[in-house]
Image: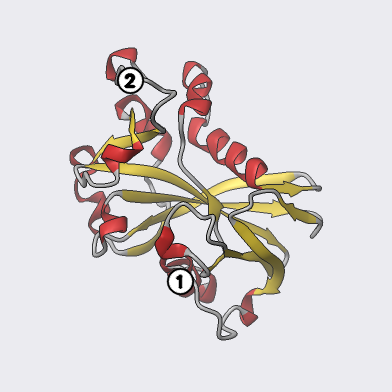
Amino acid sequence: MSRRNKTRIDVHSQRIILVIPRSLLGGFIEFRGFQLLGETNPETWISQCQFKPRSEMETDPSFKQLIPYILVRREDRIFRYRRTKRAGESRLHHLYSIGIGGHINLRDENLFSASGEILLEAALRELREEVDVESPVELRPIGFINDDETDVGQVHLGLVYEAWVESERIEIRESALSRGEWIRIDELDDGVEYEGWSQFVIEQYLRKK
């Protein structure tokens, strides 16, 4: 990422996050829901990404906030949790989720001076920040989530990863998450209410495998 693309701002007074101009994504984001990775490699977008204040980006659909969204899996089971009132987005409170993740921010800036899979490394940092996974993690990108039909969705683009683990020993670190549990994929539809992104992944990916 070129330093010319970085906004000069007071990082102590605002939360700064990674975004990409919508115009650079073109027709790629015309889908709604979950889409497999295919030929698209989001790592190639890095040179066009910028750090911007989150307070501005939440209401500016000319940019997409890049959000790693990580599914923690072992064999035929997946980890899910319930969001608490401490979750940053109030519209997600008390909903269940199968995705762990969050914004890429200035904590990840050091990644941009190195070669390699920058977004994947940021996703791994986010995973380890929110949960303590005892076993080794095999993290791989699988697709995207987009939903321009909601105000929240218009300004976010999910980068979906699967984190395959060898053990179900996992501990929640983030206070915004609660009721963590492992569940078989064929039992996910057990009457709980999921956030929209999780519902997309369940219906358009997990149930079709």
- Horizontal relation, residue 18 to residue 71: left or right: left
Residue at the spot 26% in from the left edge and 63% down from the top edge:
150
Type of the residue with mark 2: Ile
Residue at the spot 76% in from the left edge and 53% down from the top edge:
171
x%, y% of residue 83? 56, 63
- Horizontal relation, residue 85 to residue 152: left or right: right
Tell me the mark number nearer the camera, choosing from 2 and 1: 2
Assign a secondary structure to mark 2: loop
x%, y% of residue 102? 49, 46
Assign a secondary structure to mark 1: helix
Query: Above or below — where is 110 with respect to 70?
Result: above
Other-residue count near label 2 (Cα within 10 Å), few / some / many at <14 / 14–19 / ≥20: few
* Residue 199: image tag: 1
- Horizontal relation, residue 113 to residue 125: left or right: left
Q: Quadrant of the C terminus?
A: bottom right
Of residues 150 and 66, the one nearer the viewer is: 150
Residue at the spot 81% in from the left edge and 56% down from the top edge:
169
Other-residue count near label 1 (Cα within 10 Å), few / some / many at <14 / 14–19 / ≥20: some
Residue at the spot 80% in from the left edge and 48% down from the top edge:
135
* Residue 9: image tag: 2
Type of the residue with mark 1: Gln
Cβ atoms under marks 2 and 1 closer than 8 Å: no
Q: CA distance from mark 2 to mark 1?
A: 36 Å
Of residues 41 and 181, the one nearer the viewer is: 181
Query: Above or below — where is 121 with respect to 201?
Result: above
Q: Which quadrant of the view contains residue 123?
A: top right
Mark 2 and mark 1 lie on one chain; the one further toward the N terminus is 2
Q: Which quadrant of the view contains residue 128?
A: top right
x%, y% of residue 64? 29, 44
Query: Above or below — where is 12 with respect to 89?
Result: above
Q: Quadrant of the N terminus?
A: top left
